[in-house]
Image: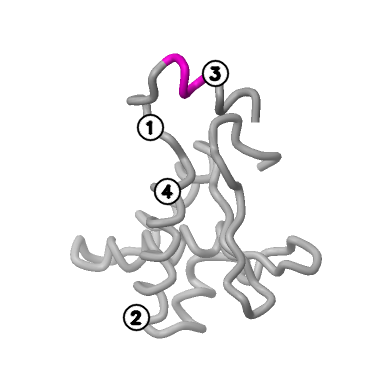
Amino acid sequence: MSGSILARRDRQSLGNGMELRLLSALETLQARREAAELAGEERERALCSNACLLARALEREEDKSPVFSSGREVLAALTVEEIAALAGRWARFHQENNPGLELSREELEDVKKN
C-alpha cells in the first residue's frame, strides 16, 4: 500500500525493528479469505483472522519487508497471546489513525491538506 489518503499515520513502530502498517481494502479482503481457508471450525476464525492480518501488517522497519509470508506462518511462529496482543495493538492504531466517515467537511479538508 502506498499510503492512505485520510490516515494521519500509515505506520507505527513497535520499537524492536518491526512496525505495523495500515492495510488497503484489498489486503483486508485477502486476509479474510486466507483466514476462512485456514480456520477448520468457526471458533478458530478469530485467531486465524488476526494471524492473517498480522502477516500483512507486520513489517521490518529497515526495508519494509514482511516479517511473515502468510497467516499460517504467523500461527506457527507466535503464541495465541502474542497474536492477540499484536492484533489489538494494530486495531487501536487503525482506529486512532484512520478517520471514519464522521469527519466534518472542515476536518476532512484539514486531513487532505496534511
Q: Bounds of the magenta span?
A: 105-109
Which kind of residue does numbered mark 2 sit on?
Val
Of badges 4 and 3, nearer the viewer stands: 3
- Residues tagged 1 and 2 counted as in contact (Cβ below 8 A): no
Which kind of residue does numbered mark 3 sit on?
Glu
Note whether 61 is above or below 22 in the view shown: below
Q: Position of residue 50 (x, y in %)?
A: 39, 63
**Colour scheme of the picture:** one colour
- Check residue 79 for magenta coloring: no
Of badges 3 and 2, nearer the viewer stands: 3
Which kind of residue does numbered mark 1 sit on?
Gly
Where's the C terminus, which quadrant? top right
Q: Earlier in the sequence, mark 4 or mark 3?
A: 4
Which residue is rendered at x = 42% and y = 48% of the image?
A: 96
Residue 80: give its label.
Answer: 2
Residue 96: give its label.
Answer: 4
- Left-right relation of 84 to 71: left
